[in-house]
Image (spheres, grey):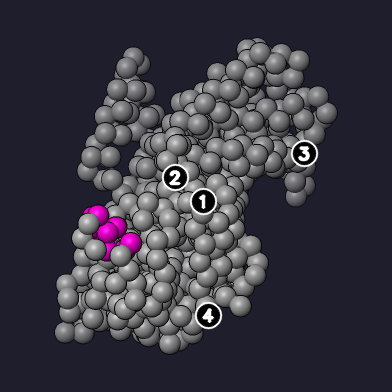
Amino acid sequence: MALLEVEGLTRFFGGLRAVGDLSFAVREGEILGLIGPNGAGKTTVFNLVTGFLRPSRGEVRLDGRSVAGRKPHAVARRGIARTFQIVKPFPGLSVKENVTLAAFLRHRRRAGAEEAALAVLDRLGLSQRAATRAGELTLMEQKRLEMARALATEPRVLLLDEPMGGLNPSEVDVASELVDGIRRSGVTVVLVEHVMKAIMRISDRVLVMHHGEKIAEGPPAEVVRDPAVISAYFGQGRA
Amino acid sequence: MRGRAGAAAWAVAAAAAAALPLAVKNSFFLHVCILVLLWTALGEAWNVLGGYAGQVSFGHAALFGFGAYVTAILYLKAGVAPWWGIPLGGAAAAAVSVPTGLIAFRLRGPYFSLATLAVAELAKLVALNWEWATNGPTGFLITSLPPLTLFGFAVNWESKAPFYLAALALAAVSMGAAAALSRSRLGAFLVAIRENEDAAEAVGIDTVRAKVLTLALSGLLAGMGGGLYAFYFRYIDPDAVLNIGISMEMVFIAVVGGLGTVAGPLVGAVFLTAVGEAVRERFQVGHLVFYGLFMMLVIRYLPEGIWGRARGLAARAGEVRRGAARG
């Protein structure tokens, strides 16, 4: 059975249908790439799955139990974590405190939470920066901090919203390695990304959205040859 | 100040403060001390929500006034003694703050602040017009206080000493509560909420619950402050205890002292009460101009507050010293 199931997910903003009747499933241990042109509704899907938006219709299930319409903190507790496309650190707090706050979700006592936070920082290569104020990090480090904070909630599914946006090519390689490492540690990943090189390399499957709907789904190599995908990206008549 | 040495220093300071009425008989001076301590407690009440959690309330007079009215009504209509009535007034203010918070915390930032302003105005209108319960604009006059004997001494309600000790106890409880909160998990959550509310939710913090719990604590402290005010001044009416000026004073004290610090409201209350009394003596008319000027200077040059700045400087000096020792 799939770990994360989305069924008939729909969301209207006024008269605009941002996401329409979207269904997909993510198997345990895989990386699903979610791609599509700007405004396709990818971030809206993340917001719907993690409780930041209420679905107009549809169902989201983790391990068979519905999480649709629950508050974000409740969804996080169930085991779905996310990062934000535009990073949202706790800027005035140290890197360690940022991650410790997330680790409190599974550790009641501060000592335990701090220990878990340091372990995550170590995994993501942020230990050197533990005492630095989060607002002073570089963009690359802030993107990593987003991931570290999400991982500290000990999720089963991690939704990454453009973890490589704004990074240079060599940083993208490092970040890809990092995402793959997260999957190997047993966390299922859904990845929204515009950097095609990364998506193609690390995704097991790719889902393509356009105007809030799914237009293709499958292994990366097949999807890029799909005429519907090509016309969505490059316009009609190019396929 | 950190750890055991800090706690010991505070205990000594509290003991010295408690002994003050034995040494000082000047009743004006004690009156000013009572005001400082009362405003410290109220500043702490506001600061747990506004300073730590970043939820700026402009309506805390509602909680203060509610506590004052509940305490006064319990005493005048049911004979409940002050030492029970003041905590009950605080508990009542905490109780009403829960449903209010559940509604008002649906709003964020300036919208939340405006909602608190509206709640306070509503509370004042209710107090003015619900004459059956509140006596309307006439308010309540407390003519006599119940006899009380403590450790073999009959308490003299005409002196300042018992009120001074009560205000000191309330200020100590408020500072203790703020200190405990700042070290707790809830306190850490509040700082996360202040820094970025979406991110706080995303890492599993129930932000509404955290804010409502904190508002309830804030209401408890502000309500007890209101109850103490009622017995000290022995007169309350809507204009005295539900005035927007009270809400603003709580904000100013926390801002001047240092937002989100335990000692900040104490420092802020000392400075603002001293400045207020000093200029009031010299300038009968227009003394608030100087008060406002002082506020502007602090916000412009000390945005982290007097205590906040002092703490920052001390921390930097410590770093320099450690650096010198190492290098």
B36 to A162, vertically: above or below: above
Part of the protein shown in magenta? A228-236
Residue A128 quadrant: bottom left
* Label 4: how many Cα within 10 Å (few below 14, some 14–19, many 20+): some
Please give the label number shown on residue A10. Answer: 1
B212 to A67, vertically: above or below: above
B37 to B323, vertically: above or below: above
In front: label 4 or label 3: 4
Q: Disc 3 is attached to a residue of which chain? A: B
C-alpha gap between disc 1 and disc 2: 8 Å
Q: Is residue B300 shown left or right of residue A160?
A: left
Q: Are marks 2 and 3 on the same chain?
A: no
A69 to A93, vertically: above or below: above
In which quadrant of the rendered image does the N terminus of chain A lie? bottom right
Residue type beneath disc 4: Glu
C-alpha gap between disc 4 and disc 3: 71 Å
Residue type beneath disc 2: Arg
Q: At numbered mark 4, what does the secondary structure look like: helix, strand or loop?
A: loop
Asked if marks 1 and 2 touch (Cβ < 8 Å), the reply is yes
- Front position in the image: A47 or B157: A47
Location of mark 4 (residue): A28
Location of mark 3 (residue): B148
Asked if marks 4 and 1 touch (Cβ < 8 Å), the reply is no
Say which label, 1 or 2, has the lower sequence index: 1
Location of mark 2 (residue): A17
Residue type beneath disc 3: Leu
Asked if marks 4 and 3 touch (Cβ < 8 Å), the reply is no
- Front position in the image: B92 or A40: A40
Which residue does the image show at 16% across and 72% down from the upper left?
A: A168
In front: label 1 or label 3: 1
Q: Disc 2 is attached to a residue of which chain? A: A
